[in-house]
Image (cartoon, grey):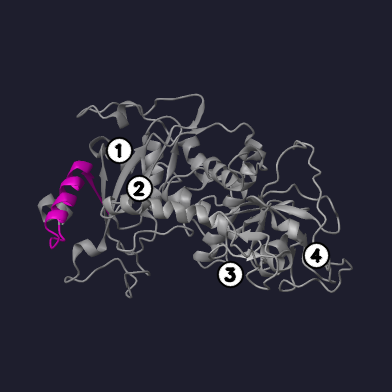
């Protein structure tokens, strides 16, 4: 920073020089009069109108500014006559009779919601021309209004599929007026995962990128973003898990990944004999599944305003259990109201705490006790508190997830001392609960798991928990 203080003046002077065009103000391609500066191209070159249109035929989402004689004013590529041609590798459709030879596309402001004295900006309201429709396209660089030229050849795909093949996800399917680039959908999903960014905050950023002075004048596509992001996530999951080119439908938990280090027969564990028996030299921990059970009361969900409008895209295919079968289990399960006789555990004492405005008061499930990876298709909603009927279903699904040949499961739970008293009776009396044949369940309290984890961090060479008694 001391060096920066000496150089600050030079840097700020250079920054101000970049705000002005070069003295000759020539196009970087044809050396004619340059009036447009592209902020997406490297070094922000100047272009004339023709070169700006030609150079950005493959880069339609760059942001440009026009020289007014005293400063650069943000504008849109729509003004230089840029058209996006679909289905013919960027060239005009031979079946179309529209003439695209005009240098500048004739645009007009037809949006009644925008004041007449509103200054020009990077977003220009769509032109209502049936031959050259302009749609709203949301990209990482902002919200754009661009002219879309569809293919009209015999047998051409529908408009939404033409957009999708060009890397644009349509917000509707009949007459799409809005589309999202694949890049912005990937960026949102990554921001949502790593930074916890909500769809509202993310789109607010996109609007401010488009117009930092009047962000509220940029079209609001927040609801469309939420819907398109869910659809895009489903497409990506089917692709990543190998179901994009298969006729087979994924089964429960097939669109989620489990811990790669935990024993999974047929995946990272070879059980060629096909039986649950194991040889004497096989370490016991190799055939043991370690599970930790717990609930989270921060993940609340309110009752939907219109339940009939709720559509599930991946019911039971990820980490959450299938809704219909889970509700059938809850309908016949008996609610055992009991208080802990050994400790003041909130998970037991508040098991029947209810809040009427909430559809789900929290979630619970099972995870790998060694590495913290959640078990697919083992996460459940709580209707009241952390009731045994909820955790019974989660544990049953976790014990049946890729455990063919696994002979033992060790479960860690805060209230295992109370939870396991009648676990086998509850499982035996329910048609929706089951334990793999031949599997032993050994309950442990979670404080033992924390102690063992600390021991592993201090002594990485120790891979057994023989001090825990019969766990092996």
Q: Nearer the viewer, residue 85 or 448?
A: 85
Camera-nearest label, 3 or 1: 3
- Residue 116: % across, % down: 78, 37
| Mark drawn on residue 84 | none
Instruction: Write down the quadrant of residue 218 in the picture.
Output: top right
C-alpha separation, residue under disc 4 versus residue under disc 3: 47 Å
First to last magenta residue range: 440-464
- Residue 309: % across, % down: 65, 39
Reading the image, the residue beneath label 4 is 103
- Residue 308: % across, % down: 66, 38
**Is residue 29 shown left or right of residue 281?**
right
Query: Looking at the image, which residue is at 34% across and 59% down?
Result: 259
Secondary structure of the residue carrying numbered label 2: strand
C-alpha separation, residue under disc 1 versus residue under disc 2: 19 Å
Camera-nearest label, 1 or 2: 2
Secondary structure of the residue carrying numbered label 1: loop
The first of marks 4 and 1 along the sequence is 4
Reading the image, the residue beneath label 3 is 246
The first of marks 1 and 2 along the sequence is 2
Camera-nearest label, 4 or 1: 4
């Amino acid at each position: 920073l001391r060096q920066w203080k000496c150089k600050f003046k030079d840097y700020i002077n250079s920054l101000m020089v970049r705000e002005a065009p070069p003295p000759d103000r020539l196009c970087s391609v044809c050396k004619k009069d340059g009036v447009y500066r592209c902020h997406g191209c490297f070094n922000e070159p100047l272009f004339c109108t023709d070169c700006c249109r030609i150079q950005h035929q493959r880069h339609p989402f760059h942001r440009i500014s026009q020289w007014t004689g005293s400063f650069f004013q943000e504008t849109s590529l729509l003004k230089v006559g840029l058209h996006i041609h679909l289905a013919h590798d960027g060239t005009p459709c031979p079946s179309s009779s529209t003439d695209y030879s005009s240098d500048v596309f004739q645009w007009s402001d037809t949006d009644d919601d925008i004041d007449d004295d509103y200054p020009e900006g990077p977003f220009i309201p769509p032109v209502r021309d049936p031959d050259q429709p302009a749609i709203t396209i949301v990209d990482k660089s902002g919200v754009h209004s661009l002219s879309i030229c569809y293919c009209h050849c015999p047998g051409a795909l529908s408009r939404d599929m033409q957009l999708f093949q060009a890397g644009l996800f349509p917000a509707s399917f009949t007459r799409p007026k809005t589309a999202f680039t694949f890049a912005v959908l990937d960026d949102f999903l990554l921001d949502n995962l790593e930074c916890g960014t909500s769809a509202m905050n993310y789109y607010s950023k996109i609007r401010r990128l488009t117009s930092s002075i009047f962000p509220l004048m940029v079209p609001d596509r927040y609801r469309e973003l939420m819907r398109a992001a869910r659809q895009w996530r489903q497409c990506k999951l089917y692709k990543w898990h190998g179901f994009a080119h298969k006729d087979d439908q994924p089964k429960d938990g097939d669109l989620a990944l489990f811990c790669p280090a935990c024993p999974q027969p047929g995946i990272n564990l070879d059980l060629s004999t096909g039986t649950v028996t194991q040889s004497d030299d096989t370490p016991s921990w190799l055939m043991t599944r370690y599970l930790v059970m717990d609930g989270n009361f921060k993940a609340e969900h309110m009752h939907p305003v219109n339940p009939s409008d709720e559509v599930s895209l991946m019911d039971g295919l990820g980490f959450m259990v299938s809704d219909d079968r889970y509700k059938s289990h809850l309908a016949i399960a008996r609610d055992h109201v009991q208080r802990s006789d050994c400790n003041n555990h909130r998970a037991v004492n508040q098991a029947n705490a209810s809040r009427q405005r909430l559809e789900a008061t929290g979630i619970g499930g099972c995870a790998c006790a060694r590495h913290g990876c959640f078990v697919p298709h083992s996460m459940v909603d709580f209707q009241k508190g952390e009731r045994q009927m909820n955790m019974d279903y989660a544990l049953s699904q976790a014990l049946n997830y890729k455990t063919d040949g696994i002979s033992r499961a060790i479960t860690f739970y805060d209230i295992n001392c109370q939870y396991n008293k009648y676990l086998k009776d509850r499982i035996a009396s329910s048609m929706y609960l089951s334990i793999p044949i031949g599997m032993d369940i050994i309950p442990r309290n979670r404080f033992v798991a924390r102690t063992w984890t600390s021991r592993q961090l201090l002594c990485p060479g120790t891979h057994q928990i023989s001090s825990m008694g019969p766990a092996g």
